[in-house]
Image: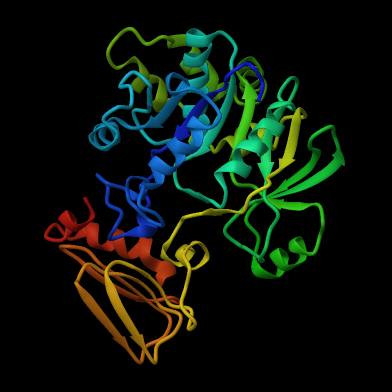
Amino acid sequence: MSQEKPVVLIMAGGKGERFWPRSRISTPKQLQKVYSKNTLLKETLNRALNITSPDRIFIGTNATLKKAILAQERNFPEKNFIIEPEGKNTAPIIALASLYFREMFGDPIQVVLSADAWISSDKEFTKTIQKALTETKEHLVLLGIKPNRPEVGYGYIAAGKPTKNGFEVKSFFEKPDVKTAMKYIKKSNFYWNPGIFLWRTSLILEEFASYSPKILKPLQDRFPFKKAGELGEAFRLLPSDPVDIAIMERSSRIRMVEAGFAWDDVGSWLSLERVLPGDSQGNRHIGREILFYKSSGNVTQTKKEFTAILGVNDLIVVEEDDVLFISSKQGVGDIKSMVAEIRKNKGLQKYTE
């Protein structure tokens, strides 16, 4: 590890609608226990503690979720939040955090993580971060994950010439269709983009100034936001861009380091098939006692003392105290539009909040 401790920014502002009914507006998936005894956010905080000290870990989120996070993480410093007044994707909050980090720490190296990922080995994660830190002197660095399936839900990176500990980046590719994804995974230099970034604060601010001044300038002009409402006024002016499009796909100073761990975006109930152990028939379960009888390929999360599943295949079953959700695997892709429909009904809105 470099003697200089990095500053870690954990992005934790998402809604997680594809994990409804477990994930609600007030308690989205990052505040839920999904694949372990810890919440997704807690897993990420523990990971961050392996690469820096507690005073250099920050959470980027909104004011409502800040209260919910502090209710769970009572020892987390209240001053270590970067609060966005409205969700505008990842680039605006990264630019805002960079201004704060420059004021607080001078010119630290940042590590940017999302709060909703599954990572197979914290030890390998730490080793990969150590390796990636060596590439941050003159470059923006992102990690690359070797694909193990033709995934259509992730962006891809084409690696170029090798560097000391990584690769130059030839190009970025947006989420492909299945046919294109099949071609990508046959190429030895193609990687998933997990959205894990490392960079020197001065460098990322330079790149914002060069490639996304519409994001940086309104924030910089008003920083450090001494008057009430100034941050909200600035955010209203900003485009809603992911940092990949705002900076990474435009900058010529990019390096990629191959991750030494398996990774998955815990994005939906179907993702649990990849991160939870299954039985001999491919059933996955979270909860108390269950019997799968003549049933296969189901994903279940129940609260009853005992659940019996008979003669059904490829279902998603989620039981909360106030909601029972049942879907086919094939149909679960429409869950966000279904939740939007529920919100339109005033009598049902409470089940999404």
Viewer-nearest residue: 147 or 72 = 72
x, y percentage for residue 304? 19, 71
Q: Identify the residue shown where x is 35% and y is 92%.
A: 311
Quadrant position of residue 247: top right
x, y percentage for residue 69? 29, 35
x, y percentage for residue 116? 45, 47
How many marks the image carries: the answer is 0
Extreme residue toward the right, this view: 161
Q: Identify the residue shown where x is 43% and y is 75%.
A: 329
Q: Identify the residue shown where x is 43% and y is 81%.
A: 314
Q: Identify the residue shown where x is 37% and y is 46%.
A: 30
Quadrant position of residue 107: top right
Image quarter where the N terminus lies is top right
Left or right: where 101 falls relative to 312: right
x, y percentage for residue 312? 37, 88
Position of residue 207 relative to residue 159, above or below, is above
Position of residue 288 relative to residue 100, above or below, is below
Could you tell me if residue 89 is visible in this image? no
Quadrant position of residue 298: bottom left
Could you tell me if residue 155 is visible in this image? yes
Colour scheme used in the picture? rainbow
Viewer-nearest residue: 347 or 321 = 321
Position of residue 17 relative to residue 71, above or below, is below
Left or right: where 151 falls relative to 96: right
Left or right: where 228 falls relative to 248: left
